[in-house]
Image (cartoon, rainbow, N blue to C red):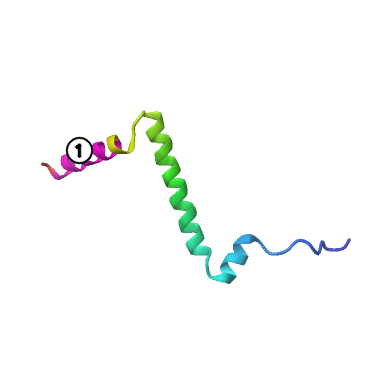
Amino acid sequence: MTKNPHIGSSVDALFEDEGTLEEINLIATKRVIAWQISEAMNKRNLNKTEMAQKKMEADNLSIGD
């Protein structure tokens, strides 16, 4: 059985060789977090302004304002 000449290294290995793997992983993580926040906002019918107001209220409560 011969090895397939069209199968090579993984994409991660390519990015690691280029020195961009960590940056790409960070970008992917940020996109996932943004997507999760967006989904949570949609589920609660909140827009960005309402979400920011709720965060500020929570911050004020934690400070003891």
Q: Is residue 38 left or right of residue 17?
A: left
- The residue sitting at 51% across, 60% down in the picture is 24
Please identify the residue farthest to the right as the structure is shown. Answer: 1
Q: Is residue 59 left or right of residue 14?
A: left
Image x and y of residue 42, in percent: 40, 32
Q: Is residue 51 above or below residue 31?
A: above
Q: How many marks?
A: 1
- Report the span colored magenta: 51-63
- The residue sitting at 57% across, 70% down in the picture is 18
- The residue sitting at 20% across, 38% down in the picture is 57
Image x and y of residue 53, in percent: 24, 37
Q: Is residue 25 left or right of residue 49?
A: right
Given the image, on which type of amino acid does mark 1 rest? Glu
- The residue sitting at 81% across, 64% down in the picture is 5
Quarter of the image with the C terminus in it? top left
Magenta: main secondary structure: helix
Quarter of the image with the N terminus in it? bottom right
Please identify the residue farthest to the left as the structure is shown. Answer: 65
Residue 10, by quadrant, is: bottom right
Q: Is residue 31 left or right of residue 46?
A: right
Residue 7, by quadrant, is: bottom right
Is residue 53 shown in magenta? Answer: yes
Residue 12, by quadrant, is: bottom right
How many residues crowd mark 1 within 10 Å: few (<14), some (14–19), many (20+)?
few
Q: Secondary structure at mark 1?
A: helix
Is residue 7 shown in magenta? Answer: no
Give the labeled residue for mark 1. Answer: 57
